[in-house]
Image: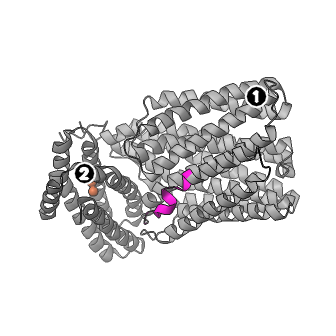
Amino acid sequence: MFNQNGLSLDQAPPISVVFRFFLSGSLFGLLAGTFICLFGTDIFNPDTTQALIITHTLTLGVMLSFMFAALFQMLPVIAGIKLTAPTQKANLVQYPFILGVLSLLFAFHSGKPAFFMGASLLLGSAILGIAFVMLKNLIALPNHSNSSRGMSVALTSLVVLTLLALYMTGTLAGLWQGNYYTQIKTAHYSFGLFGWIALLIISISFQVIEMFYVTPPYPAFISKSLPQRVFGLLLIGTVGSFFFEKTWMVIDLFIIIFMLCYALMTLRRLSQRKRPIADATVWLWRLGMGLLVLSMAATLDTRFYDVASLKALNYIFFAGFALSIVLAMFYKIVPFLTWFHLNSQGYFTAPMMHEVIHPKTAMKHLYIHIATLLAFTVSVFIPAVIYLAATLTLLSFGWMLWQIVHAWKLYVHTQKTGEKFEMNIA
Amino acid sequence: MGIAQFMTDEHRSCDDHFAAAEQAAANSDWQTAEKAFLAFSNDTLTHFKREEEELFPTFEAQTGNVQGPTQVMRYEHEQVKGLIGKLAEALEAQDRDAYLSLCESMMILLQQHNMKEEQMLYAMCERLLPPDLKEETLSKMKQVEL
Ligand SMILES: [Fe+2]
Ligand SMILES: [Fe+2]
């Protein structure tokens, strides 16, 4: 029974399931960098098509890809959920998803209803399909942790924001009138930024901060109910906005408070960690939390000062927050999985985590990432700097791509040439 | 003190020894590293033995489930033991880079294992075992030695 298909490995999906989503995420990142080269600072004006295109390349193409990778990997580890036929499911999600994102970008660019139609069908089926499968498994769990409960809430937000998006793409495809377009749009991005991206990061962090850095657990007032409360607020905001225009003003205020509590608590936990060595991922978490705080401060400020540059900064800070956490997860998950799978398969020669990605390589990416964020920030005031920011974006995602390809090659190479150890304990 | 609390405390104390060893190795203070690592491996192996010889069989008898969570836990113990061996080799060789790299794998492996126990297995034991049996199992576990 303890042969190469050990029980623990049985629970984890094949490494290719996780790596393929990291791969598509970084390829979309390169696409985003290319778009920024072409569009320049137009991306900072939320009313432009360019802003729509770059936002969806980043949130859908990059972030959702990475989050699929995280979900496929973390559901078995965090919640003990074993998805049946994970490779097949990953294929069924990934191909329509990639085509759907491209179709949506073409739709924004051309305004042609047919592309909106195609995007609706492809993205709707891929995202809702996998979200339902994952939610069904989560709901069936007999024992919930704070993390698995939070992930259920985040996935529900993904369903809601996708349905809201379908209302909009349906309108643009000419299927219906879309009388509530404005309200739905606000609800869509609120659920997207807070309900999905922020809550998924938060729920996963309840587990991984403790697990990777050996810290005390989050206090119950955050880990037990924060995701549910944020979700509730988003619902109230959505429904309320049909009756009172200013509903979101109040709702956002509460959400900001929750986000600040979470960010400050995470910074505190990171300073309480038992493992004193601060690798790149610790700094990426700190950077991410710092950016979340800045982004919330900027959101608060845009209440009082309707200044374009402030909105642009908010945009940069929030994207920086999400990407920093993605990188922090990436630099733990990729080396660990490569080692873990090979080791569990019984290879003597399984490369150690540092051989897959050396800590110095991760550190270099941290510097590139910081430089990218600084360049974007400066470009709000000196537009020409946007081209430096775009180049750094390309470098950053290219760096990531290279790490995945390298890890994958090492994995395949070890499987081909490595010496194997047959464990016959029974 | 109940089973869950006692065992969770043991996890935490092992973490402390482990972190001390890692920090010392990072500073190339091999003497301190060795001492802390020995404490870590002794405590961890004793803890595993308490689980494998007392807690898991009790759980299995009570639930009638011998193929479930306890089997996964046993398998993960084997993985951790394998890593302890490799860490000891790296320590012996005073190979700082290898030691720190193995530490990274060890912590992820061990932490996710401990969390599964704390959140699921120990919690289930607390809920499912009758009070006398809990007390009996705990006192038996305390007597286990390496
Ligand atoms: Fe254990
Ligand atoms: Fe344990």
What secondary structure is marked by label 1? helix
Q: Judge by depth and name the residue closer to the eye, A303 or B65.
A: A303
Secondary element at image label 2? helix
Stretch in magenta: A216-228
Q: Amino acid at mark 1?
A: Gly
Mark 2 surroundings: few (<14), some (14-19) or many (≥20) residues within 10 A = many
Residue A148 is situated, as x and y percent measured from the top left of the image, at 46, 47
Seen at 45% across and 36% down, the residue is A137
Numbered disc 2: what chain? B
Picture quarter with ligand 1: bottom left
Residue A108 falls in image quadrant:
top right
Which label sits on residue A381? none
**Are tags 2 and 1 found on a single chain?**
no
The residue identified by callout 1 is: A170
* Looking at the image, residue A44 lies above or below residue B145: above
Residue A114 in magenta stretch: no
| Residues at discs 2 and 1 in contact (Cβ within 8 Å) | no
Q: Was residue A224 drawn as part of the magenta stretch in this picture?
A: yes
Q: Residue at x 19, y 42 (%)?
A: A425
Q: Position of residue B29 (x, y in %)?
A: 36, 76
Whether residue A66 sits left or right of residue A395 in the image: it is: left
**Label 2 belongs to which residue?**
B125
Residue under the image location 56 percent in, 58 percent down? A362
* Camera sees residue A372: no
